[in-house]
Image (cartoon, rainbow, N blue to C red):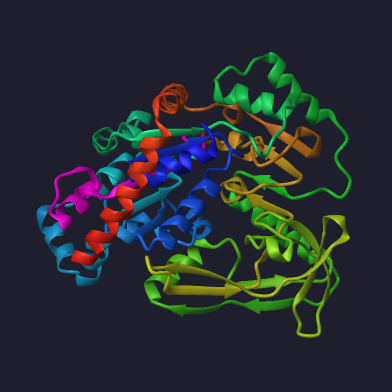
Amino acid sequence: MTQELALDILKSGRNVFLTGSAGTGKTYVLNQFIQYLNKYKISSGVTASTGIAATHIKGQTIHSWVGMGIKNQMTRKDLHFLSLNKALLKKIEKTKVLIIDEISMLHLNQLNLVDQILQYLKDNLLPFGGIQIVLCGDFFQLPPIGQPFEKSRDKFAFMSTAWVNAAFNICYLTQQFRQDKNVLSEVLGAIRNASVDKDIEAHLKKKLGEKQLENPPIQLYTHNADVDRINEEELDKIEEKVKYFWAKTHGKKELIVTLKKSVIVPERLSLKLGAKVMFVKNNPDKGYINGTLGKIIEFSELGLPVVRIAGKKEIIASPEEWSIDDDKGTSLASFLQIPLRLAWAITVHKSQGMTLDSATLDLSKTFEKGQGYVALSRLKSLEKMNLLGFNATALSIEPLAVKADKRFKELSAELAEKVDPADLKTEMEAFKIKAKALKFIK
């Protein structure tokens, strides 16, 4: 399905699951939809399953937004207690659209709980209390964290009662904007289709024997301990004076705690001349996006780091803000910091959502299905990759995710075939009128 058709379906007010492989523009379409909602003043909740993902769309975690915290179930007493929270009740009463990004990492119990809470607080037994629900993600990405004894069918959100009742329109984006037709796309396609064979493995084994790229680029590891160790070791090797940059925070304390845990940039950023760094914020106007790599070549007159990126372009890294906003765009909490982090190494988990020009990957300790796919899909080609190692888990995907993805493709194709553009436009106008009318009544 094209981005344009998916966006029109989103605007129609239908419940939607927006999916597609890495690099097809899911976040782009989601941001276009959020801009549309803001333009027409349609109240929305912009959330994600994790704090890191939430900062990418200037939202908050679904756990915080709906008031469920870390709970997996709620009693009638718990629900009644939530109904006494006037701010929460007012927010949910006026919300017309709820967006949850990175749905692959939300446990099915928690999606059921979101449904239960919204039905209770809105006093409406329709799925999710009658709110348009938009889920976005790819179930080949990192899976939900569950109990050791839980099987995949006990964790994936698409196995939940709430998912079935919502009757989602499946919008599976198919146009690839990150990888061209190359060996990497062949490898990723094989992993997605669970068809990794000796030829695919040979492509990766060949990388193990190749001469490493000069000036080794960013390194992706599966464990935090490896990442921290490498970055500290590399910074210590530089015989320059260290400069510290402290973040400035403002807003509600509990939300600030969430931001501190979520943003990729540290609260105390330690930098030196010659340090390898990565921008962790999107700012195309200034010439960088989340994942742009560079090197600190000097500090400006104001003491700000000057970063030289590819093409010898130099950028002064001035402070950027990460925030959690309400549906009106008002900041509830903010975190102001230089948008950089040391970038000799990062975890695969924190690379999710990034596009990297080049990288060194160590997948020899991969412990979870999907990690290898996430790491490899950050890149545009194998030519710009150093591979230190990989294991069988790195090339595997959860079988249930493979089966579900095949069905998602079929349902999306059926929807694209039968949907009438004229009907969509009618639905769009009707939804805008309904949303405004409900707002007026409130």
Q: Is residue 288 above or below residue 4?
A: below
At a point 10% along the width and 58% down the height, the residue shown is: 77
Residue 114, image x, y percentages = 26, 49
Of residue 275 and residue 306, the one placed in the foreground of this image is 306
Q: Write the residue at 33% across / 56% down.
A: 63
How many marks overall?
A: 0
Look at the image and say whether residue 126 sits in the magenta stretch: yes
Residue 267's spot in the image, x, y percent? 58, 72
Residue situated furthest top in the rendering: 198
Q: Is residue 391 left or right of residue 302?
A: left
Question: Is residue 155 at all visible to an observer of this figure?
Answer: no
Residue 425, picture quadrant = top left
Q: Where is the C terminus found, in terms of image quarters?
A: bottom left
Q: In the picture provided, is 394 more to the left or to the right than 38?
A: right
Work out whether residue 395 can be spotted: yes
Q: Is 310 situated above or below 103?
A: below
Single out the residue that lies furthest toward the bottom: 301
Above-or-below relation of 75 to 362: below
Instruction: Locate residue 212, reporting x and y percent.
Output: 85, 39
The quadrant holding residue 81 is bottom left
Give the camera-side residue of 197 and 19: 19
Q: Is residue 131 part of the magenta span, yes or no? A: yes
Q: Which residues are magenta?
A: 115-141
Measured as percent of width and height from the top left, residue 261 is found at: 49, 63
Residue sitting at 36 percent across and 36 percent down?
Answer: 423
Q: Residue at x 76, y 82 (%)?
A: 303
